[in-house]
Amino acid sequence: MLRRLFRRKKEYKNRFLKFYHLNKKRLNKERRSTYTAKMKLGVCVRCKRKALKNIVFCSYHRAKQKEYNKKARAR
């Protein structure tokens, strides 16, 4: 309790970062539940198209992910 009283108030660069840090736990929980729900339905987790079999992405986002991985490995 005393720690809370004497804790320094954090400074945030902008209001969006402040909102994110103050609501981080709830936001991450929502994101995880949305991801698992879409995965179970067989819908792409980035859009609303049908996902490929045993993959969480549709064909479009699967190709985008392959490109991203190729560039990341090249660095």
Image: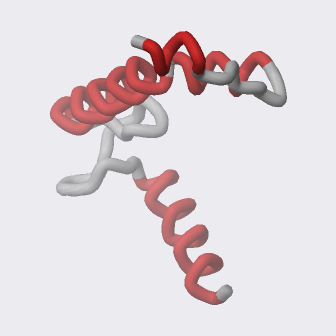
Q: Which of 46/30 is in front?
A: 30
**Figure check: 55 above or below 74:** above
At x 31%, y 45%, the residue is 51
Q: How is the image coloured?
A: secondary structure
Image point 77% across, 17% down: which residue?
A: 15
In screen coordinates, is 20 left or right of 37? Answer: right
Q: Which quadrant of the rendered structure holds the N terminus?
A: top left
Extreme residue in the right direction: 13
Report x, y in % for residue 73.
Answer: 56, 84
State the quadrant of the C terminus: bottom right
Quarter residue 42 falls in:
top left
At x 64% / y 78%, what residue is drawn?
Answer: 71
Residue 70 screen position, x and y as percent: 57, 80
Residue 30 versus residue 13 in the image, above or below: above
Q: With respect to residue 56, does 38 lie above or below? A: above
Relative horizontal placement of residue 4, taking residue 34 as reference (left or right)? right
Residue found farthest to the bottom: 74
| Residue located 33% across and 25% down the image | 29
Image coordinates of residue 40 in percent, x first then y, are 16, 34
Q: Nearer the viewer, residue 27 or 6?
A: 6
Q: Tally the numbered discs.
A: 0
Q: In this image, 26 relative to 5: left or right? A: left
